[in-house]
Structures are given as C-alpha cells and as structure tokens.
C-alpha cells in the first residue's frame, strides 16, 4: 500500500487533546506492554484490594462485638491460602492459553458454550462492580484524610470514572504509564508502613489506633451455628482480596513477547505483593487495636456516648488510615503519603476492569454473543465501545448505591468465584484431552497441572458456595439474578446473528434481475436538489418514473402543481392527500400499491436533500428525509436513494483548487 492511498487521520481539536492522535493499525505492536507496565495495568485491582480486605473481615466480625476479633488471623490465613492456590492455577491457564480470553475461552472450549457464557456473564458483571467498588473505596480513602469530601462522594466517584474512561481511551500503554505511578507508590508506601511499624515495635514503642479505646455494640448475639455463619460471612468478605487475579489471564495478548512467560511472571509478582501486604496490614490492624463497625451508632466512645451522637462526630476512618496515623502520626508526611497513594490505587484499580471488560466483550462479539460494534477498535486501538459501556454501567451503580463500599461489596466477588471455578474445571478437561495424545515424557507435567487445577476447582467451588450462602440475602441475590438475564441476552443475540446469517447465505450465485423498476422522486418544492433528483432518476432508466408530493398543506400542494405545469416538466406529478399531516404513511401506502403483488418488482424512492456545512445549521432544518428513510427501510422491495446537494459546495471546491 502506497502513501498516496493511505488517508491521513482527521480528528477534531477537542478529541485530539482528550484522546490523542489516531494510531495506525500497523503500529499495534508498539502498544504491547513490558512487565513493569503490565503489573499496574492488570494488577492494580488485586493489589488495591488489600486496602479494604482486612477492613471487611473486621467489619463483619464486629457484628458480634469485639470478642470475635481474635479470629481474624485464621480467616486471613484462609484468604492467603486461597489466593496462593488461585494464582498457581491461573499460571497454568496463562501458559496453555496465550491468546487470552481467560475463564470464558477455557470454559467455552472445554465445558461447552453454556459454561463459557456463564463464566462470561459472571466476569462482565464483576468488572462493572470492580469499577464501582474500587472508585467508591478510593473516595472513602480521600474522605479519611479530608473529611468534607464525604458530603460529595457520589459526584467525586462519577468524576473519577469519567477521568479513568478518558485515560483508557488514550490507549493501554499510555494509560499504563500514568497508572504505574500510584500503583508503585502504593506498594512502596505499604511496605514502608509495615517496615517502620516493626522498627518502632522492636524499639519498644507502643502503636495505638485512634479507635483502640472504642467499644462496639454487638448487633446480634451469636452462639453455636450462628458463630460459624458469622465466620463464613467474614471469610467471604475477606475474599475480596482475590478480585482481579484473573485479569492477567484475560490480557495475555497485551504483553510483549514472550507473552505467556511474561504474563506468568507478572502474575507471581502480583501474588507476592498482594499476600505480603495483606498479611502486614492484618497484623498491624490487630497490633494497633483497630476497631471498626458498619454503623456509627454501634460505636461506643470511652465516655459511654455513641459515636453517632458525639458533637465531634466524623465518619469512621479506614483501617489503613488508622494504621498509618498510629505508625507515622496523624498529620505527618507518611500518613498523607499512604492515604494519597491508597486513594490513587483504589481509584485507578478500576483500570484492571477497563482492560478486561472491553477485551472480553470484543471476544464475545467475534463469537456473535454481543453486538458486533463491541469488536471495533477506536482511534487509539482501544475497544472504545466497550469502554463507554463499562463506564455507563459503573456510574449507574455508584449513583444507585450512593457510592457506599459496604453496600456495593455485598454484590462483589460472586462473579469472581463463578469464573474461578469454571476456569479451573475447564483446565482439568483440557489436561485430560492433552494427556490422551501426549508422549510419555510430558505426562508427568500434565498430571501435575491437572492436579493443581482440580484442587483449585474444588477449593474455589467450596468458597463460591460460602460466598453465595453468606452474601445472598445481603445483596448478592442481585448478581445471581443479573447473571441469567445477561446469559439469556447473549443467547438471544447469538440466535439473531445465526438467523440473519442463515437467511442471507448464498447457496448458488445466479443473477436475478427485477422484472420492473418503478422510480418515485419525492418532491416538496421545485428547487435545485429536486431537479438533480429528477435528472438522476432519468439516468437509471426505470420502467416508470413519476414525482410524488405528499400534500400535508393543500395550498402548498396546489402551488407546486402550478409551478410544475408552468415549467412544462415532462415527469408526471402525483399529489397524495394527507389530511392527518403524516408524511410516511401515505407514501408507504402509495409505494405498496405501485409495487402490487409482484414480488420481483422494485420501487426506487429517490429523495432529494441538501447538506449544510456547519453542524449547528443542521438543527435549523427538519429531519424529514431521515425519518422517511427509516420508515421505508422496513418495506420489502423498496430501494431508497438519496441525492444530496451540498450547500456552498462550489465555494469550497474553488478554495481547494
């Protein structure tokens, strides 16, 4: 292809400033990510989850008062074990499926299309929730450092979603460079917090959180089986630390070669960071005596007054904020550093979903399960339609749930464990198929992989049951209901595309010419566009040709007839009465009568229209031509042809010459 045949990209100034210049398709390789950028792009969600996973465990245990907080280490150990198992399992997926797609591809190829669609519906819903929860948690972190921000949580959250959307429209690599700053800043801040805390503890210092002296009123009295149910609910809340682990397996194609190896390495680094930071925050929360409650009314201050009734009432600070204040000091640089980067990574953790939702939607679109528009790449080689769809649903969730993390978190992680379970079960089937044709030298590796994925499938299935049972009545039922709806929608879309493909499939190529072509030129006045349309209609040499006017205004119709006769136009003019001032229905009835019962006849409706030069001028003119085209589109045997007349066209042509 020569440069003469390659059009130069044209973008408006506003779009160029917000999104950037278009990227040539051949430059797609330059957008691939090295490991140092892939980590913040695909791992910001699981890394940021450690900022609120410990808090969610403490919140649930506090429902029974402070007596159950000593069980926190055991629940945290369960979360760490689960995260380790899932990470090792997904390393197998990354190596075996370098084309990406994650749980959907694995389940679809090995368990069948229904299982694949269940995994896809779970992931799509979970990605929307990831954006909502991450941004809401980030706003909470801002509120912990700057309390007046709490009064504008919803507006701030939606504003951050808009910002992240714009950054992702600029491209994966460009957004990854920006998002690397808060991700690595957060990791450094948390490790500095943990390290300095243990230095101070080793030198005999006492670290006390501001809530250590608070008492928490138990909402219920738990005994026997109820205690077990409380622990299961706390464990399922702590499993939010696993959200986003599957993101790397979905985004393998975005890595630089060798793709699978780099993705597997990034996955292990992410797991190492997540596990160590989660353990450190949990230990420090217990050491400093952090107490949190779901409602301020359940918190009792040392003077016996409920926190909600105190004159100095302020929203409870997050667990990380209280630990940072205890370790570094409330107004110190360290405190504000940790809070700033915690807020940054929580907000930008939504970027993980922005990478995977559009990518998964494009794969589903290629498989004809979602609208084909979701497979289109924008100017910056981004699946722009998927980005906009994700942003819209996320903003809706934030608005409906008032950007409350505690309310949104109840809907979270159900989809995560559905996809985990189906993905690992699919990998077991994959290993079995591979084992049948594998040489003896590879069977040991295959057996090990099958065992890992089988254990992962069983473990995640058990956790899925726990999550469903403990969170169903607290809001997870909405996700359980939404998944079948999305599943049915994707099946319906697939059915539509299959029906269309069957109907338009060409069995044998043979010319079938219409028996007659009747041309109808729609006119409202005698003008240059009308004359051009009449001339065009003559040029196609139809079997019959006539001009048609819909007489919405009888006086105007009579004047048109007079002008027509006076100019001695040799094309007959038919005036159709329209006493109800409707343009489309009288015209459609006339076209149907003209075509008659002969299915091989064609009626060509020629519509003259003029094109203005400025967008705002279009608002000053009616859209009757567009409405008529839409109305005639559904009529069989009707061809609609537009003959445009470009206003000021001669002036533009002369200026270009």
Image (cartoon, rainbow, N blue to C red):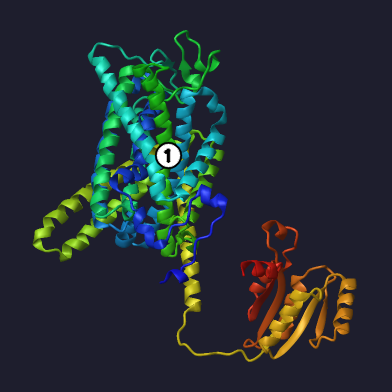
Residue projecting furthest to the left: 441
Establish if 428 lies above or below 267. Answer: below
Residue projecting furthest to the top: 303
Task: Give the percent coordinates (x, y) of residue 48.
Answer: 37, 36
What residue is pinned by disc 1?
348
Q: Residue at x 46, y 24 (%)?
A: 144
Query: In the shown orientation, is residue 202 left or right of residue 619?
Result: left
Question: Dot 1 lies on which element?
Answer: helix
Query: In the shown orientation, is residue 539 left or right of residue 62?
Result: right
Q: Residue at x 46, y 50 (%)?
A: 170
The answer to whether residue 190 is visible is: yes
Q: Of 167 and 303, which appears nearest the observer?
A: 167
Q: Of 457 and 10, which appears nearest the observer?
A: 10
Q: Residue at x 29, y 28 (%)?
A: 191
Establish if 347 lies above or below 531. Answer: above
Establish if 217 lies above or below 633. Answer: above
């Amino acid at each position: 292809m020569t440069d003469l045949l390659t059009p130069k990209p044209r973008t408006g100034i506003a779009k160029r400033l917000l999104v950037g210049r278009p990227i040539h398709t051949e430059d797609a390789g330059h957008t691939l990510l090295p490991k140092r950028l892939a980590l913040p792009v695909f791992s910001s969600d699981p890394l940021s989850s450690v900022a609120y996973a410990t808090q969610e465990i403490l919140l649930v245990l506090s429902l029974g008062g402070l007596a159950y907080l000593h069980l926190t280490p055991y629940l945290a150990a369960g979360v760490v074990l689960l995260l380790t198992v899932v990470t090792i399992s997904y390393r197998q997926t990354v190596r075996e499926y370098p084309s990406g797609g994650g749980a959907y591809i694995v389940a679809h190829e090995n368990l069948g299309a229904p299982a694949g669609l269940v995994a896809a519906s779970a992931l799509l819903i979970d990605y929307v929730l990831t954006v909502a929860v991450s941004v809401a948690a980030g706003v909470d972190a801002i509120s912990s450092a700057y309390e007046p921000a709490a009064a504008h949580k919803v507006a701030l959250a939606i504003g951050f979603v808009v910002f992240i959307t714009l950054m992702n429209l600029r491209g994966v690599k460009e957004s990854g460079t920006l998002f690397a700053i808060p991700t690595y800043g957060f990791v450094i801040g948390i490790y500095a917090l943990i390290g300095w805390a243990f230095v101070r503890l080793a030198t005999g210092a006492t670290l006390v959180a501001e809530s250590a002296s608070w008492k928490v009123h138990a909402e219920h009295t738990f005994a026997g089986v109820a205690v077990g149910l409380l622990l299961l609910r706390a464990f399922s809340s702590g499993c939010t630390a696993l959200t986003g682990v599957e993101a790397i397996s979905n985004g393998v194609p975005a890595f630089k070669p060798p793709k699978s190896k780099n993705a597997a390495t990034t996955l292990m680094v992410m797991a190492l960071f997540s596990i160590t930071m989660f353990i450190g925050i949990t230990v420090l929360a217990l050491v400093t005596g952090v107490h949190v409650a779901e409602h301020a009314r359940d918190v009792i201050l040392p003077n016996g007054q409920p926190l909600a009734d105190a004159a100095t009432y302020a929203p409870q600070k997050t667990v990380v904020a209280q630990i940072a204040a205890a370790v570094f000091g409330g107004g110190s640089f360290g405190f504000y550093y940790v809070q700033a980067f915690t807020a940054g990574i929580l907000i930008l953790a939504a970027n993980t979903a922005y990478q995977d939702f559009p990518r998964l939607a494009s794969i589903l679109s290629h498989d004809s399960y979602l609208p084909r528009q979701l497979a289109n790449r924008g100017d910056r080689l981004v699946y722009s339609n998927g980005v906009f769809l994700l942003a819209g649903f996320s903003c809706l969730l934030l608005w409906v749930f008032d950007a409350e993390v505690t309310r949104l978190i109840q809907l979270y992680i159900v989809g995560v464990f559905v996809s985990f379970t189906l993905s690992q079960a699919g990998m077991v089937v994959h290993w079995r198929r591979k084992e049948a044709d594998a040489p003896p030298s590879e069977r040991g590796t295959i057996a090990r992989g099958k065992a890992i994925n089988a254990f992962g499938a069983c473990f995640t299935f058990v956790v899925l049951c726990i999550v469903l049972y403990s969170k169903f009545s607290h809001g997870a039922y909405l996700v359980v209901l939404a998944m079948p709806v999305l599943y049915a929608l994707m099946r319906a879309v697939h059915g539509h595309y299959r029906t269309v493909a069957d109907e338009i499939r060409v069995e044998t190529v043979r010319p079938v010419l219409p028996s007659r072509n009747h041309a109808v030129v729609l006119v409202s006045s005698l003008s240059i566009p009308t004359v051009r349309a009449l001339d065009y209609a003559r040029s196609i040499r139809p079997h019959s040709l006539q001009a048609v006017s819909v007489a919405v205004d009888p006086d105007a119709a009579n004047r048109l007839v007079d002008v027509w006769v006076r100019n001695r136009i040799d094309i007959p003019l038919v005036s159709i009465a329209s006493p109800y001032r409707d343009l489309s229905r009288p015209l459609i009835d006339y076209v149907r009568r003209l075509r008659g019962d002969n299915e091989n006849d064609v009626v060509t409706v020629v519509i003259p229209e003029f094109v203005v030069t400025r967008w705002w001028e279009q608002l000053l003119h009616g859209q009757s031509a567009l409405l008529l085209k839409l109305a005639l589109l559904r009529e069989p045997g009707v061809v609609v042809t537009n003959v445009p007349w470009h206003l000021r066209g001669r002036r533009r042509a002369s200026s270009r010459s």
